[in-house]
Image: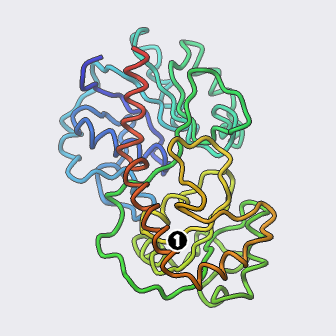
Amino acid sequence: MQELPKILFVNATKSDYLQDWTYAGLVALLGKKRVYDYPFNYRYHLPMKEYPKNGGYCPGGMHQRLLNKMGDFDLVILASSHPECFQAYLKIQDRLPKNLPIVFIDGGDRAEIAGDLQRYNQSNLLSDSQKYRNFDLIFKREYLKNKDYPKNVFPYPFCINTQQIPKDLPSDKKYDVSFWAVESHPIRSQALEILEPLYDCKKNGTKKKQDFKKYARKGDFYLKEIRRCKIVLNLRGGGWDTARYWEVPAVSTFMLSQKIQIEIPNDFIAGEHFAAVREDLSNLTDICDYYLKNESEREEMAAAAHKHLLQHHTHIHRANFLLEKVRQLL
């Protein structure tokens, strides 16, 4: 592989956070000439979507994408566990040189490799994609701490595309405690049951039966509103890894969170970057009460988490980690 590889980035054209952030990171590292999205993903080249569905948008890339042509590549990345991505890969699979490294990014919610295909009743796509050849490397978001994976599988959690964070974040803290989340796991329902009648929760929208499609806070406004919170709660949803786990430190807001049960290299540290809530939520209100009263300690931890994120968990860090593992393979 060349020092700067040329990558065939086989993707799902639907929004896929980890896929999209990886694309943006690769473009930042290698340039637009060296990352070829297939099929063509308009979200990467036109400002058609707002946050968080614009995670792969790279300004100024449309002209270069039109000039680029399918050709010789140094690496193929199968970038999503969505069926559309596998279907696109199967169309070109037999045309790829057998010595070309094939990487799979599994950004789905499930612990099994490409487990999300089960949700779509298309588990056969995984075996179909490996009839021609196996994946050389697999990068997995939901890499459980208590589960054994093959040696070619690496933890690869969410991150933040720092280019998507508004430059004009507010400084006022108008909300005490927030948890703006759909009830995709029982622990979320339990937390909302506890919080809804307390603090300013009901007034700020921290309540049960929320609907993602009907969120009042969207796009950059959502990130600015997270910034306006004194305390933001993070709890697992369909998977352990949530966008909120990275968004809150990204805007320098204090986070109260479960300890995440997936492998995260250079993870945030409880007591240093965030406050840990027990799995039974028995200390939820005690921690909220404490940090609402202790502003300086709260804000110091939020600042430390923000610094840690910028040092280890941007879209560029993720893409660089992937490329480094490919270099080691070769």
Residue placed at 18% from the left, 44% from the top?
A: 63
Q: Quadrant of residue 124?
A: top right
Residue 111 image position (x, y, % from top left) = 69, 38
Q: Nearer the viewer, residue 317 or 71?
A: 317
Residue 203 image position (x, y, % from top left) = 62, 90
Q: Residues within 10 Å of mark 1 (few under 14, many from 20)?
A: many
Task: Tally the marks.
Answer: 1
- The colour scheme applied to this rendered structure is rainbow
Q: Is residue 329 left or right of residue 207?
A: left
Q: Secondary structure at mark 1?
A: loop
Q: Quadrant of the C terminus?
A: top left
Residue placed at 48% from the left, 71% from the top?
A: 253
Which residue in the protein does label 1 denote?
A: 254
Residue 319 image position (x, y, % from top left) = 38, 38
Residue placed at 67% from the left, 68% from the top?
A: 182
Farthest residue, direction top: 98
| Amino acid type, callout 1 | Phe
Name above or below for residue 173 compared with residue 322.
below
Q: Nearer the viewer, residue 17 or 258?
A: 258
Q: Is residue 200 left or right of residue 243?
A: right
Name above or below for residue 204 compared with residue 67.
below
Q: Nearer the viewer, residue 223 or 46?
A: 223
Q: Quadrant of residue 149?
A: top right
Residue placed at 78% from the left, 77% from the top?
A: 193
Q: Quadrant of the N terminus?
A: top left
